[in-house]
Image (tube, rainbow, N blue to C red):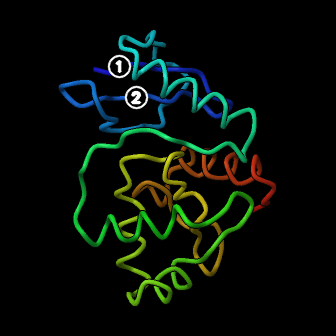
Amino acid sequence: MFNAVIDAPFGKVGIRLDAEADSVREIVYLPDPVQNVAPDTPLAEEVVRQIERYLENPAAAFDLPLAAIGTDFQRRVWAGINAIPPGVVLTYGQLAKELGSVPRAVGQACGSNYFPLVIPCHRVVASSGIGGFAHHADDDFFRKVKRWLLAHEGVSYA
């Protein structure tokens, strides 16, 4: 069950809030056939507003209460991802070096990101190309989403 599902240029975006509806629990990329869901709380309305603003302007910043989930390491990687500005990409290896880690661990933390768009994991790519996305390395839908997001920010990947 989603608190909102909205249209996006690459499909749909689903939004889940925590049980108290006071923080975002998850943002999910969904294919076109999924039915839209009108926001059912004021926070869901705000999440929709901020995502739509980003989809219009890739420089738009997010200011949303995010649920305190993920391991300490994942949160450290996600903070590193948040520091990457729109239009800039880092490889898993570059981000790993900044964090004193290894590329595979950073890739796993990127793929486990509960808050895509808000924590822009699409800005982290493989050294040999676009890489996987959301633990879907061979999924055309998720690669299409990642390519669209990067192109939206002015970065092109084949």
* Residue 1 pos. (x, y %): 28, 20
| Circle 2 crowding by C-alpha within 10 Å: few under 14, some 14–19, many from 20 | many
Residue on which disc 2 sits? 15
Left or right placement of residue 123 versus residue 45 in this view: right
Instruction: Give SS at disc 1.
Output: loop
| Circle 1 crowding by C-alpha within 10 Å: few under 14, some 14–19, many from 20 | some
Q: CA distance from mark 1 to mark 2?
A: 6 Å
Q: What residue sits 74% from the left and 60% below the top?
A: 87
Residue 141, relative to residue 42: is it above or below?
below
Left or right placement of residue 48 versus residue 153 in this view: left
- Residue lying at the far left of the rendered structure: 19
The label number, if any, that marks residue 109 in the structure image: none
Left or right placement of residue 77 versus residue 95 in this view: left
Hey, what amino acid is under mark 1? Asn
* Residue 148 pos. (x, y %): 70, 46
Hey, what amino acid is under mark 2? Ile
Q: How many marks?
A: 2
* Residue 48 pos. (x, y %): 52, 24
Instruction: Give SS at disc 2.
Output: strand
Which residue is at the front of the view, 62 or 28? 62
Please report whichever mark, 1 or 2, sits nearer to the chain's N-terminal start: 1
Query: Do the residues bearing badges 1 and 2 touch, measured as CB atoms within 8 Å?
Result: yes
Residue 149, relative to residue 125: is it above or below?
above
Quadrant where the image shows the C terminus: bottom right
Left or right placement of residue 62 versus residue 18 in this view: right
Residue on which disc 1 sits? 3
Q: What residue sits 61% from the left and 81% below the top?
A: 127
Q: What residue sits 45% from the left and 9% below the top?
A: 38
Q: What residue sits 50% from the left and 30% below the top?
A: 13
Q: Quadrant of residue 79?
A: bottom left
Residue 136, relative to residue 6: is it above or below?
below
